[in-house]
Amino acid sequence: MSESGNLGWSVAALLLSLIALAPLIAIAVIAFQSSGDAWPHLIDNVLPGAVRRTVGLMLGVGLLTLIIGTGTAWLVTMYRFPGRRYFQWLLLLPMAMPTYIIAYCYLELFDYSGMVQTGMRGLFGWRNAQDYWFPDIRSLSGAIFVMSAVLYPYVYITARASFIAQSVCVIEASRTLGRSASETFWQIALPLARPALAAGVALALMETLNDIGAVEFFGVRTLTVAVYDTWLDRGSLAGASQIACVMLAFVFALLLIERALRAGRRFHHTTGKYRDLPEDKLTGMRGILAVLACVLPLIVGFVLPAGVLVDDAIAHVSAGLSPAFWQAALHSLLLAFAAAVLAVAFAVVLAYGRRQTRSKLVRGASLVPAISYAIPGTVLAIGLLIPLAGLDNSIDGVMRSLFGVSTGLLFSGTAFAIVLAYTIRFLAASLGAVEAGLSKISKNIDAAGRTLGATVSDMLWTVHLPLLRPALGAAAMLVFVDSMKELPATLLLRPFNFDTLSTQVFTLASLYRYEEAGLSALTIVLVSLAPVLLLHGIIARSRPGASASRPSGARSRPEWALRIS
């Protein structure tokens, strides 16, 4: 019974891994199909420029997020200056601002018809753009600047976690040997943090590659936009799949580069941190500069766009609270809730199946969903469309032959496709939270339960799940919020006349109706603040939690569970 239980969990984990892998397999199959004259046209006229702009955007965002994220993390970790304790968590706030929302906010501020240029023309009497010079926000440099303002927290988080974990002995030894604080940073702390910085930059670049809203608003025709246009405008799914393969090459290159930067060298941390890291106090002009270095990213990445959203929402509250808003909000909530439940269920099966077996196949397959976050939403949408459409056609054919009834589209072209896309896309976040929770539960508990006659499933339902409640809640919240913000997959998979808050914002902003999009965008940002605050608590918490504490409701458990608790 024990072996059959393990076998069942192993098979379930393999099946879910296959579901997560299916979109990539489908894309590869579709890409080998003929696209007619689409592929030669794409090679000659679309791909060179799209690749060049994508590479330029990623290089710019990577460099700027690295500088901002690393610099602010070092300041709040190693120095004391006015407001430092508040900047530690305030610098995370831009994470709540999706790239497509901050893009339309900055267009409303700095575009030719925006508030800043309109005010300048009224103040100085200028009549048109020929009378003055103003940087063009609708450009590659504008996209780099704006996207970096909300993506730098990925580097800030990993850099700060690395700086906090670095041994006080190494830092003090460097200072004792005569190195200044800046020399210690460049020669000791930065090399030690290289793996963390590589991971943070890789995450920021994956978000950059996935974005479709900001680059569309700024007129930067990246590979993501090329996939969208090729599929919907040219009607060539094969051509879109071939561009998607190029995007996947970027994804795997990022993953390989990130792994290479973490491998090949040993990054030594002495065991145990005996006391807090030494902190230098910054006063006078140095303190002012430190405050400015932390304030500027916060203003650019959160305060300014949040002010625009609040102003739009208040000024157009009656128009914003239209039936279309409530319907889009309901769609977003239902889709995000369904995706959160499904992603957590998938994660539990994958993590628990891996825990209960020594099979290299199962353990290897369970790592497949871990790369799902790296798959851009446009690529995932294409990869899901064909398998789901094939399943619909098969069901429809069977029903026609047996009962003479057409079932139509049951999976593709329905909300189910969006939920499945969200689940696969954000399964990595859910799986990471569940595996982290399981890792804190000693396997001795499993052994004791099995000795007392409990099956694998009994242990999961009666012992592990109650202990995993905090991890499951965190996983569900992360998937829920990410699903609320997701735009590319939703745009490509949504049924006709079906809007979510994210697609409503994109549509209204594309029509230059910025003010009407304010309430929908503000709702997304407010919902997105929840995991940001949770993340701050995780980083700030230095004392490990009592993850193996006895859960409430123990009296209702069977005798074997009570005996091992």
Image (cartoon, rainbow, N blue to C red):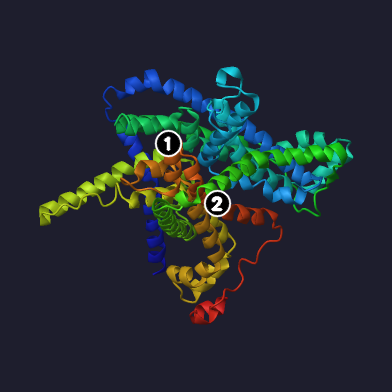
Q: Is residue 30 left or right of residue 545?
A: left
111, above or below 308, in the image = above
Residue 392 location, x and y as percent? 24, 49
Q: Is residue 23 left or right of residue 367?
A: left
Q: Element at badge 1?
A: loop
Q: Quadrant of the N terminus?
A: bottom left
Q: Looking at the image, can residue 199 be seen?
A: no
Q: Amino acid at mark 1?
A: Leu
- Give the labeled residue for mark 1: 511
Q: Quadrant of the C terminus?
A: bottom right
**Residue visible at 68% across and 34% down?**
67
- Give the labeled residue for mark 2: 528
Residue 511 location, x and y as percent? 42, 36
Quarter of the image for residue 288 reads top right
**Residue visible at 45% across and 27% down?**
221
354, above or below 505, in the image = below
